[in-house]
Amino acid sequence: MTTLDLAAMLQRHGGDATRLVQILHEVTAALGYVPPATITELAARLGVSRAHVEGVVGFYSFFSAEPQGRFRVRFSDNITDQMAGSHALCQRMLDAFRLELGEVSRDGLVSIARTSCTGLCDQGPALLVNDRAIARLTPQRIGAICSLIRGEVPLAQWPENLFAIHSHVERRDRILAAVMQPGEGLAAAVARGAAATIAELERSGLRGRGGAGYPTGAKWAACAATPGPERYVVCNADEGEPGTFKDRELLAHHAELVIEGMTVAAFAVGAQRGLIYLRAEYPFLVAPLLELLERRRAAGLLGRAVGGVAGFAFDIELHVGAGAYVCGEESALIESLEGKRGIPRNRPPYPVTHGYRQRPTVVNNVETLAAAALVARDGADAVRGQGTPKSAGTKLLSVAGDVARPGIYEYPFGVTVRQVLDDAGAVGSQAVQVGGPSGTLLAAREFGRRIAFEDVPSAGAFMVFDQGRDMVAVVENFARFFAHESCGFCTPCRVGTTLAAQMMTRIATGVGSRRDVKDLARVAGVMKAASHCGLGATAGAPVVAALEKFRPAFDQRLRSLDVVPTFDLDLALAPAREATARDDLAAHLDEEGP
Amino acid sequence: MSERAREPATVPRRKLRVATASLAGCFGCHMSLLDIDERLVDLLELIELDASPLTDKKRCGPCDLGLIEGGLCNAENVHTLRAMRANCKILVAVGACALNGGLPAQRNHIDVRDCLQTAYLSGPGVERGFIPNDPELPLPLAQVHPLHDVVKIDYFLAGCPPSAEAIWQFLTDLIAGRTPVTTHGLIRYD
Ligand SMILES: Cc1cc2nc3c(=O)[nH]c(=O)nc-3n(C[C@H](O)[C@H](O)[C@H](O)COP(=O)(O)O)c2cc1C
Ligand code: SF4
Ligand code: SF4
Ligand code: FES
């Protein structure tokens, strides 16, 4: 732990309160947490209220106002991590330090907690320690990590191979096979002209790869058509959907293509600034991305007169998120970029007219931008020629779970689920969760369905469960994920996700009743109808799908009674029994009642 | 039953038997029921009260309707609730405490042992105290729970307390056989 010169640090950030999330990252790196006195000082120096700073600290799970360990360990808790044995490994480390989950050791050395998916599902189980990620955990690796922590070896001196992140590309198509010279896409766009570039994109049929599938050309056109003193291009690299790791691969090995896409977008819509919102779980991408941006500046592909085009000034900065899934939602992402709590805005107005700093803003997913760069260079027909009528081009799938070869698979849209399973070496699969917890749960009889907007859309995740897996536990994991990630702004989602998680846990642990099953469906309905943003709207989807497709797995767990108490009545009297030293008949409650 | 007897107009009206109970509540919901004022007379045309703090009858017999204010804070509350459930065809949770635990649930973050110790042993002004342990006294649960955590509840009437207006509309609906709907404006937390 080092000390922190707050004044100097804030000066580097230009005393700009919109950089608060980045500032808090630096405070956390230096002090391990954000002490109350620092919160007060930050508020004063940035000219914002203390409540604002404290609110931001409290919102993001990677910040804390309470002391954390000097080594802050977070185990990734996606279902694929669990399937690979993460809970046992986590317990091993807890035992080694005699800690409870979420606890800080008394000497302040280490704290151990869980976090949502870290995007290393092809090489899990994984964990984060401070700002480093470690994949492919084994008992041996856990042992090594424990010794390093115990020896207080600074992270910088840990063996580099611990931090190695592998790349598993199993199938390449247009995007992953592309070789793009820096500036090639931009040059083609410039030659065509801004308006014609957007028209080309519209003709290509390219749709957003972040989940919603909005036509990219129309989005750019709307932004370009909105008058304003400045415009922005935002690359959504939050990749928070559990089971998704294709943007990680793109940014690790094809970042040039993504930045090219951002630059083309900036040229087409007339933007001066670009922002990359990178999830905090990918710290290993920060330095390479900053280097790449530097290289492009040196090559005249960022800065003034980009690509030699007089008057086209454009530069890109990197923002790092702080462990909030909802910040992948584009308007929450913009709030976060502005240094605020990541609470989704009312939409409309949409970011294309009122985005970053209320200016017209294009927000696109990493993969969308890579595909757009190729449209600029190769023309619409090249993309149009692949895929299905409503889903042009190719899609990157992040395949994980019960398969022989987890990794990235790029297919033309329209590929069947069965084809993907075969290629990945899946045997005896009973279910696939396409697009992550907020996507679609498919049972074996549906493996003939196709990945495409007109059939099964996907933001990229493809998690496979074989017949040995307990689907109730799978759905419970998803329900807990949503309860943890709900931003708490609106009641249907804040309350609904927690109720759903509690009911799922009751069912999974064998104390649920038929009423829980009924209420689950009802709660899911309310969340879908009444939530403020997409998180709440889809949070009930896996439960509803599982109840439809795997109902017997639920029913087998239920107790026969129609309604059973949700807690152990007799146990609830134990503290009072202890305090009064009573053990008479009236000091007990039986479970079934009279 | 003959054809004639099934004609809607000839269904004989009988008074509904209603029980009420106050568990871990403040009696505010019962006061709100009394606040329907002169309509109480109309109400008593339609119902007869069984066990209720208003009649001081303690044991609940078979009833059509049970109204419960307050949540579950001790073992006795659980017994009363179960007796009500066993006897009432329709059970209604009335007020925030019955629905969510309400004000009494504010103690849920305090350990019951600490609570008893402070109140009876170590608190200010306590001398030679002891924690009451008479088997007659119901033991407190570790936490205050809403009613639906233990039995099936058929209807929920929100508010703290629900207004007299809301209670009146709810009861008249229920008695007339209409599914009660508390419309916007009737749900209030004072
Ligand atoms: C809860 C939630 C989380 C989201 N997370 C992401 C994400 O991690 N990455 C992403 O690209 N889009 C995410 N989206 C979708 C974005 O809101 C937005 O539609 C997308 O970034 C637009 O880019 P595209 O048109 O290129 O897909 C999320 C949406 C919701 C509702
Ligand atoms: S739906 Fe959930 S995540 Fe979205 S605004 Fe409401 S509480 Fe927040
Ligand atoms: S809901 Fe309000 S009025 Fe009714 S018992 Fe509880 S505190 Fe009293
Ligand atoms: S429970 Fe009485 S004030 Fe809310």
Image (cartoon, coloured by chain):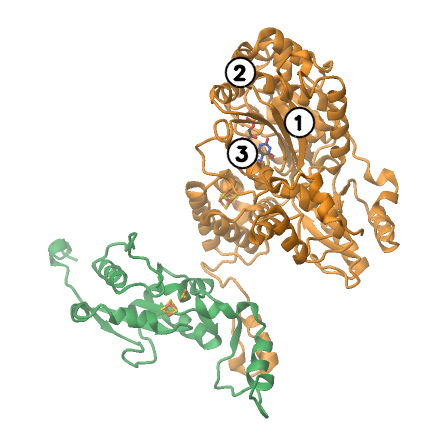
Chain colours: A orange, B green
Quarter of the image that includes the C terminus of chain A: bottom left
Is the residue marked by circle 3 packed among few (<14), some (14-19), or many (20+) residues within 10 Å? some
Give the spatial CA distance, label 3 vs label 2: 30 Å
Mark 2 residue type = Gly
For residue A462, which quarter of the picture? top right
Mark 3 residue type = Arg
Identify which residue, A6 or B160, lies in the foreground: A6
Query: Circle 3 sits in a helix, a strand or a loop, which is it?
Result: helix
Residue A101 visible: yes
Is the residue marked by circle 1 packed among few (<14), some (14-19), or many (20+) residues within 10 Å? many
Subunit of mark 1?
A: A
Image location of residue A57, percent across then percent down: 62, 50
Give the spatial CA distance, label 1 vs label 3: 16 Å
Is A577 placed left or right of A9 in the picture?
A: left
Is the residue marked by circle 2 packed among few (<14), some (14-19), or many (20+) residues within 10 Å? many
Residue with the mark numbered 2: A205
Residue A158 visible: no
Image location of residue B49, percent across then percent down: 25, 74
Give the spatial CA distance, label 2 vs label 1: 27 Å
Residue in the picture at 71% in, 47% down: A7
Query: Circle 1 sits in a helix, a strand or a loop, which is it?
Result: strand
Identify which residue, B164 or A358, lies in the foreground: A358
Query: Circle 2 sits in a helix, a strand or a loop, which is it?
Result: loop
Q: Earlier in the sequence, mark 2 or mark 1?
A: 2
For residue B13, which quarter of the picture? bottom left
Subunit of mark 2?
A: A
Residue with the mark numbered 3: A357
Q: Which mark is residue A316?
A: 1
Identify which residue, B180 or A351, lies in the foreground: A351
